[in-house]
Image (spheres, rainbow, N blue to C red):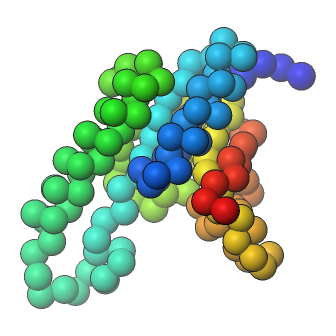
Amino acid sequence: MSTYQHILVAVDLSTDADKVLAKAKALAHAFGSTLSIVHVIEPLSYAYGGDLPVDLSGIQEEILKQARQKVAALAAKANVPDDRCHLPTGKPAMEIQQLCEKLKVDAVVIGSHGRHGLALLLGSTANALLHGTKTDVLAVRVGD
């Protein structure tokens, strides 16, 4: 088995993010790997469609500002420098996959809720990463 050189931890900034980050940090420490953090910001237009008569740019900027603060706090806990913290905007699975390729990541660590039913086994983002990423994926069980 080859060791992991670069591990990417994908966080959703929920209360479970600390647990996911702790697992990723332990894995990175065990392998002597570089650790990077990603949080993908989904545009409000995805949730509400593009034809809203309301300007959501102010709200989107506030979401980005708060995400930066939360990711910075997580990064400080894990000793991850700012240049290895990523906040792309888009669809989470797609953005994480693209970042994996760009950074030449060996493994992705992501939280997964233990929901019932085959379709909810890993959650949509974790499931998409498992099937769409060329790297290993570690799904950390959270929120039971």
> Residue 4: horizontal and vertical position, in percent?
72, 22
**Nearer the observer, 104 or 59:** 59
Taking the view exactly as shown, the residue that stands out farthest to the right is 1
Residue 65 drawn above or below residue 83: below
- Identify which residue is drawn at 19% across, 86% down: 52
> Residue 20: horizontal and vertical position, in percent?
58, 42
Residue 14 drawn above or below residue 44: above
In the rendered image, the quadrant that contains the C terminus is bottom right
> Residue 126: horizontal and vertical position, in percent?
65, 57
Residue 104 visible somewhere in the drawing:
no
Residue 29 visible somewhere in the drawing:
yes
- Identify which residue is drawn at 69% across, 26% down: 27
- Identify which residue is drawn at 46% across, 52% down: 15
- Identify which residue is drawn at 65% across, 16% down: 29
Q: In terms of image quadrants, where is residue 8? A: top right
> Residue 88: horizontal and vertical position, in percent?
36, 47
